[in-house]
Image: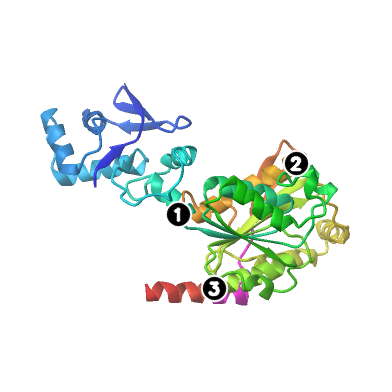
Amino acid sequence: MRIALKECAWERWDDALVVVCDPSRQIELSDPDGHAEALLTALAAGPQALPELRQRLAEAGVEVDLAELGDAVAALDSVRLLEDADDPAPVPAAPEGRYFSNLAFFELFASLETSRLEFQRRLGTAHVLQLGTGGLGSNVLQSLAGLGVGRLTLLDHDLVEPRNFARQFLYRQADVGRSKVRRAVDWVREFDPRVDVAAVERRVGEPADVADLLGGVDLVVSGIDQPDNVDTLVNDACVSAGVPWVRGGMVGSELVYFSVDPGRTPCYACWRKQVDEEASVPEAGAVAMRLASGRSRVNRAIGPAAALVGSLVAFEALRYLTGYEPPYAAGANVYVDVAGGCQQRREPWPQDPGCALCGRARERLAAGAAVS
Ligand SMILES: [Zn+2]
């Protein structure tokens, strides 16, 4: 492997080096003997293997053995200053520059273990099942397509209506009365014909309506609101199949999203259990919860709201699909208060020790780990 130094700048500050790679963060490296600066200078000459790097350092008057050099390189890698210059596998074929910004983003998170190309490749080989192409779905879909997700299956049963135009920008006036999911598929094909995209015109009424679509699926994104127990149905199907799922929506003046990583985090059924327990406590909060759940659901999602929660859900999808950072909303509701400057609040929910779905999901993970 040849080691590459990412584009960065540094300057000495007393006994330390101040290094900036990601312009929003500063790294301070303790460097009383000047060896760290010598190493950065040597690395800046271009991608090179460890023995070559050691030779270059020796020429600069810094003698280190390969083990010491390996430790120093690992230290620079741990603060994300390095990446592998010899990633051999190509990203999916694409017009020149198609992934320029994606790769520039992934550079921030790349390391000797995972190159920026590898992050893009993970997206290219991913299959996402998206439930709903309405307010949440039509916004998530555009981000997933832009990210370069290779395969998309879209499910919906609605027709385009005038009221959708507050927030669903995939659709055109000429589409009113037509199938949403078919128009969404056409949009993806027009946007990027290399995406493998399929439409499923279906209403979700039981877990099997989702379960039979999960073969080979890496992640489910859900934005459907009907029937009232739809999240329970989707949770049943996804947790049983071991497929993570992300849900986003709007409740009153708050956006909310969460994700479930089967066997690793508490599932939606665990959350329902907690809600039911809280609702049974004799106090004002429980009364308010009961009153709130009895109110009819009015869709108040204006364009900025749908776009914002769609982006947050797309980020969570990106975390699952690439691992650039761990999922943020796994087993937690993340609320965004649109009546409070769009501030975020994260509320994890507890594992229900009696949850049969989670129990089976953990057994499946353990069995998978034992096999591999
Ligand atoms: Zn559970």
Residue 80 appearing in the image? yes
Q: Is residue 10 left or right of residue 294?
A: left
Magenta residues? 348-360
User: Is the CB of mark 2 within 8 Å of ligand 1?
Assistant: no
User: Is the CB of mark 3 within 8 Å of ligand 1?
Assistant: yes
Of helix, strand and loop, which one carries label 1? helix
Amino acid type of the residue that numbered disc 3 sits on in the rendered structure = Ala
Q: Are marks 1 and 3 in contact (CB under 8 Å)?
A: no
Of helix, strand and loop, which one carries label 3? helix
Residue at the disc numbered 2: 303
Q: Is residue 125 left or right of residue 17?
A: right
Cα distance between the residues tagged 2 and 1: 30 Å
Mark 2 and mark 3 lie on one chain; the one further toward the N terminus is: 2
Which is nearer the eye, 355 or 162? 162
Residue 313 appearing in the image? no
Of helix, strand and loop, which one carries label 2? helix
Cα distance between the residues tagged 2 and 3: 37 Å
Amino acid type of the residue that numbered disc 2 sits on in the rendered structure = Gly
Which is nearer the eye, 155 or 249? 155
Residue at the disc numbered 1: 122
Q: Tell me residue 117's x, y (percent).
A: 39, 47
Q: How is the image coloured?
A: rainbow
Cα distance between the residues tagged 1 and 3: 24 Å
The quarter holding residue 297 reads bottom right
Name the residue located 73 percent from the left edge and 39 percent from the top edge. Answer: 304
| Residue 207 on the magenta segment | no
Residue at the disc numbered 3: 361
Name the residue located 37 percent from the left edge and 47 percent from the top edge. Answer: 115
